[in-house]
Amino acid sequence: MRKHYIQYLLNEEGQAVQNASVTITAELSGSSSSAEYFTAEDGSNTSTDALLTDVNGKFEFWIGDKNESVGYAPGTKFDIAWTGAGINDNTLSGVDILPDKTLFSTTLTTWIPSGNKFYNKINHGLNRRYPMIYCYDTDTDLMVDPRWIITESNNEITIYFDNDGRNIEAVILG
C-alpha cells in the first residue's frame, strides 16, 4: 500500500512558490540516502530525483510500504528538504510517512450551506490525535484559514468558512 504525501510551499506573503526543488531522503540503519518514491498513486513509475513545486506551490509523492516492489518498513523516517527563489531553505526531519498504524487522509471540495456559513464534518478516527488541515482558495492561489475548526468528539471535527466555500479545497492529513 502507498502512502500519499502532499504539501504546499508558500512565501512570507502567503503566495505559492513555483519551481522550488524538493528532495526526499530516507533514514535507514543510522544513515540517510535518497528515498525512492512513486510519482503516482497507481503504476510503477518511481524516482529518486528532486521534485519541483507546481504553479500552486504544491508537491506530492507516494511512499510504498514493505509490500511494494520499492517500499519501506513501517516507522521509517524521511527528511523532506526544499530550496527555491523567494523562500528560506528548510528541512522537515523525521517525517513519519509510514507509521505503524493507519492514518487519515482526505480532500474536501464540496461544502454544506448553513445560514451565511459553509461547513463540512470530518470523521477522522484519530482518537484525540488531531489532523493537519490545509485550506486553499483555488481562485486566488492562496492558502486560507477557516473561520472555525470545532472538535465535535475525539474522532470528528467540523470546518467552517464565512464565504460560500465553492473555491476552497481542504486537504486533511493525520
Image (spheres, helix red, strand yellow):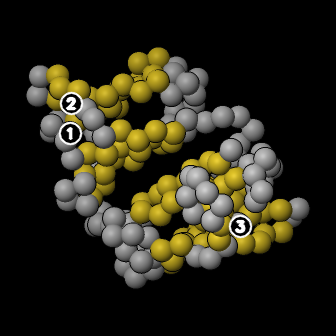
Q: Amino acid at mark 3?
A: Ala
Circle 1 sits in a helix, a strand or a loop, which is it?
A: loop
Crowding around mark 3 (Cα neighbors within 10 Å: few <14, some 14 to 19, many 20+) is: many
Alpha carbon of mark 2 to alpha carbon of mark 1: how far?
Answer: 6 Å
**Residue 107 left/right relative to 163:** right
Residue 165 - label: 1
Q: What type is the residue that disc 1 sits on? A: Gly
Q: Which residue in the protein does label 3 denote?
A: 35
Residue plotted at (51% across, 28% down) = 124
Rendered residue at 63%/65% (across/down)? 45
Label 2's element?
strand
Q: Residue 136, how many percent across, how many down? A: 31, 51
* Mark 2 in CB contact with mark 1 (< 8 angstroms): yes
Image: 99 above or below 59: above
Residues tagged 3 and 1 counted as in contact (Cβ below 8 A): no
Front of the two marks 3 and 2: 3
Residue 120 vs 61, above or below: the answer is above
**Extreme-right residue of the structure:** 29
Residue 4 placement (x, y as % from top left): 57, 50
The quarter of the image holding the N terminus is top right
Name the residue carrying label 2.
118
The image position of residue 35, as x and y in percent, is 71, 67
Residue 87 visible in the snapshot = yes
